Amino acid sequence: MVTTTLALHHDWDVEISREENRQWIPVARGEPEVVVSKTTSPHEDTIRMESNNNVAALLHMDRLYLAWRTAPLHFAGPDTRLYVVSSGDNGTSWSLELEVFLGRDLREPFLLAMDERVYFFFFEGGVNPIDFEPLGLFRSERIRPGEWTEPEIFGHKGEVVWDIVTENGTACAQSYSGDYSTPGDAQDMGQLFMFFNCSTDGVTWAPAGKEWTYYGGLTELGWYFDLAGNIWGVGRNEDGDDSGWGSRTFFAPASDLSDWQWMSDQAIYLDSEADLDVLVRSLDIRVAEDVSTRVRSVPCSKNGPRRTILVP
């Protein structure tokens, strides 16, 4: 896990113009610095183990939060721990905020800010290194520096939150649960439900429309809003279903964010750069069909800066 020094000014205004053939290229300020590894930690009171991953970060009210999973292996086990640290000086020094240890696997940490509140999410798993056994989601709220509420369970049994996006004061979470397939069993196809829930306070969540948005093998999914409020995303179909295995891209209209419309009936297996190009082009074509060309200035967040971009 590495980080770079953050700029003191965070108004990242982005202007993209295809007509003028200009590109926005992020520039790292300073050399990368290893923050967490098997020999390095931002705080001396954390336990360092071989596997360090499942990272979450949040910049909120001039304070930087960092969370990660550390364990002997990437796979499930009873020794896993989650840590949350924070920094008020841009990463020069860190304070230990929270340690979570339940004697079982812990994964997918998320940090979410809603108004002045900060929440920490994660899920508890099993201890079998060759099985995937999500048991439940947990949530903890920061009360004051170094003090958090006891993790409380929420959601439904076996649910896993994979991505949370906050826009204009509303947080939307994509999660999944169901009958997880047996590793290596080609006959045990995906029987997973995909959910899309939203919240304005980080505590009460409700479906954005239909109770679930997909049934099959999709699990890990990345998505975001366009300027019209529609959703574009790509999901990893690792459990397999009638569409095959690989990646699937989708679109959901602003009028019903639970109406996921797929670019293709078949998943795309990314075995080469050419396959990646096909995937990107399929998404570009759909954007061109559904959204007219326009330039807008829109808020990046409820009280944040504005950005000007060209939508194809």
Image: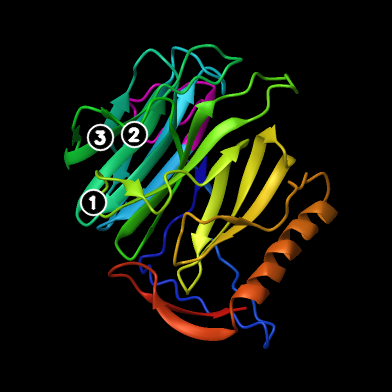
Element under label 1? loop
Element under label 2? loop
- Marker count (numbered): 3
Given residues 261 and 96, the one toward you in this image is 261
The numbered mark at residue 155 is 2
The residue positioned 36% from the left and 69% from the top of the image is 9
User: Of circles 2 and 3, which is in front?
Assistant: 2
Inspect the magenta stretch and tell me whether residue 311 lies in it: no
**Stretch in magenta:** 35-54
Q: How far is mark 1 from mark 3, CA to CA?
A: 13 Å
Q: Amino acid at mark 2?
A: Gly
The numbered mark at residue 201 is 1
Location of the C terminus by quadrant is: bottom right
Left or right of 212 on screen, residue 93: left
Residue at the disc numbered 3: 140
Element under label 3? strand
Q: Is residue 283 above or below residue 82?
A: below
Q: Is residue 49 above or below residue 90?
A: above
Given residues 76 and 207, the one toward you in this image is 207
